[in-house]
Image: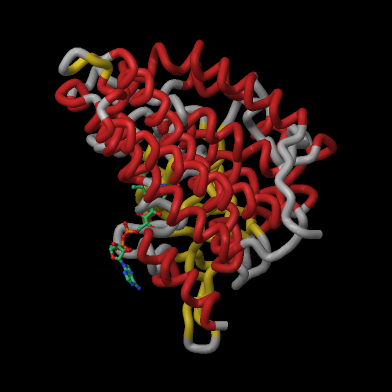
């Protein structure tokens, strides 16, 4: 079927509901949560009550039963107002719940999904370590099998894990080295509940951006998990993690698109009311052109992202477009935040103006879930094929 974009009535209603929620519940708190670097459990629960947990999981598996575009639209609408809350929802759904749903055994799904879809609890994705980010194959965390107890014993640490140290997090999917195969590290994923003895979680502080999102450091000291908590087969870990990131790229693109749309809305309002030389600054062509460039790039970013979602929904290869969308939406977000800030003049440098937070939050988008350099590597590999 040729590409045809269509936002269903259900998706439009969801967009309206999330937009109204973000304006009423998130906007009034975003400044203080960012200033105090505070992750809010009550606000996270409210997002859960709205139906933003387990969005793409079918109803029969305890989820909300929505299509992928609806999830993307919800993340976009949150990011229009606050990157931190969007990060909590994007990471929980695409990095936390999705691998459990796609690769979990029936018993694992039944054990975890009901509590991860009802708005109460989060699940995190533990891939990055202090010594291995982009090069995630070189993870050092190990899991050794103890055949007597039929348990895996995990040792090592993880860094930068979104939702990893939140008090309402139930567990983490962790990639660990379980041996060597064909001269390479054999990587396997495990579902590690946060109350496992030997697991220590520390919230990372002093971030420049996403300050109200929880980012955790995790330390594993002889953490034992039963073999039934292994996610997928032994040696399948890297494939699970990389396929999860292909989907994750769509939601981080949505964060970029939403941030850019939010920056444009703020800048447009300001440009209409701020006067300079006797006229609103929007009447100065230099300012009007900035707004025109922002709107044009946003339109292009939206089309790229929604087409990638459409391909995914149609069951067609979407990975190349997901990498392109992630790369482009993050660049458009940074452009829109910077130009928006310029339109605000000196006020754009003051924390009380949300455009200042948007400018900081945009920086993460070219780093998280694969840097812009890594996206270019992925795209160029597809071109070479
Ligand atoms: C706020 C935040 C939240 C995060 N959440 C999570 C999470 O939930 N789970 C998780 O597992 N991780 C998470 N991460 C980690 C994130 O995915 C990594 O930071 C990212 O993949 C980059 O890894 P790195 O920081 O180690 O940089 P490095 O890999 O050390 O890269 C440093 C620089 O070198 C460049 N580079 C590296 N290799 C190449 C190459 N082959 N060619 C060209 N350039 C290269 C990179 O692009 C970058 O510019 C998070 C990070 C942040 C900041």
- Residue 384: % across, % down: 52, 82
Query: Which of the two residues, 366 or 269, is positioned nearer the viewer here?
Result: 269
Q: In the image, 357: left or right of 381?
A: left
- Residue 160: % across, % down: 36, 47
- Residue 200: % across, % down: 38, 42
Q: Is residue 94 visible?
A: yes
- Residue 295: % across, % down: 44, 38
Q: In the image, 191: left or right of 132?
A: right
Residue at screen point 48% across, 35% down: 258
Residue at screen point 50% across, 64% down: 143
Query: Which of the two residues, 102 or 262, is positioned nearer the viewer here?
Result: 262
Query: Which of the two residues, 14 or 234, is positioned nearer the viewer here?
Result: 14
Q: How is the image coloured?
A: secondary structure
Residue at screen point 18% across, 26% down: 345
Query: Which of the two residues, 293 or 377, is positioned nearer the viewer here?
Result: 293
Q: Which quadrant, please, contains the N terminus?
A: bottom right
Q: Is residue 219 visible?
A: no
């Amino acid at each position: 079927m040729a590409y045809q974009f269509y936002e269903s009535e259900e998706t439009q209603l969801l967009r309206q509901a999330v937009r109204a929620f973000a304006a009423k519940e998130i906007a009034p708190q975003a400044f203080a949560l960012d200033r105090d670097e505070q992750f809010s459990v009550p606000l996270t629960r409210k997002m859960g009550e709205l139906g933003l947990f387990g969005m793409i999981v079918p109803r029969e598996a305890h989820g909300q039963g929505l299509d992928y575009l609806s999830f993307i639209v919800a993340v976009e609408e949150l990011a229009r107002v606050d990157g931190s809350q969007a990060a909590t929802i994007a990471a929980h759904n695409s990095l936390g719940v999705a691998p459990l749903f796609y690769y979990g055994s029936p018993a694992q799904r039944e054990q975890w999904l009901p509590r991860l879809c009802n708005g109460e609890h989060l699940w995190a994705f533990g891939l990055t370590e202090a010594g291995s980010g982009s090069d995630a194959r070189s993870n050092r965390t190990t899991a050794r099998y103890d055949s007597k107890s039929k348990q895996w014993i995990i040792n090592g640490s993880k860094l930068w894990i979104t939702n990893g140290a939140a008090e309402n997090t139930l567990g983490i999917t962790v990639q660990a080295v379980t041996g060597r195969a064909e001269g390479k590290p054999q990587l396997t994923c495990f579902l590690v509940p946060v109350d496992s003895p030997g697991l220590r979680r520390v919230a990372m502080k002093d971030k420049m951006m996403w300050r109200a999102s929880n980012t955790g450091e995790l330390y594993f000291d002889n953490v034992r998990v039963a073999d039934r908590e292994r996610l997928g087969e032994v040696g399948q870990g890297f494939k699970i993690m990389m396929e999860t990131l292909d989907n994750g790229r769509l939601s981080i693109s949505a964060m970029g698109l939403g941030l850019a749309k939010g920056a444009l809305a703020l800048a447009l309002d300001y440009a209409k009311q701020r006067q300079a030389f006797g006229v609103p600054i929007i009447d100065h062509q230099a300012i009007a052109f900035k707004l025109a460039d922002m709107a044009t790039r946003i339109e292009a970013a939206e089309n790229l992202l929604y087409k990638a979602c459409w391909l995914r929904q149609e069951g067609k290869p979407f990975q190349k477009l997901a990498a392109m969308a992630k790369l482009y939406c993050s660049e458009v977000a940074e452009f829109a935040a910077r130009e928006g800030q310029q339109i605000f003049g000196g006020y754009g440098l003051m924390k009380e103006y949300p455009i200042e937070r948007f400018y900081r939050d945009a920086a993460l988008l070219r780093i998280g879930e694969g840097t812009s350099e890594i996206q270019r590597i992925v795209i160029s590999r597809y071109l070479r094929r």
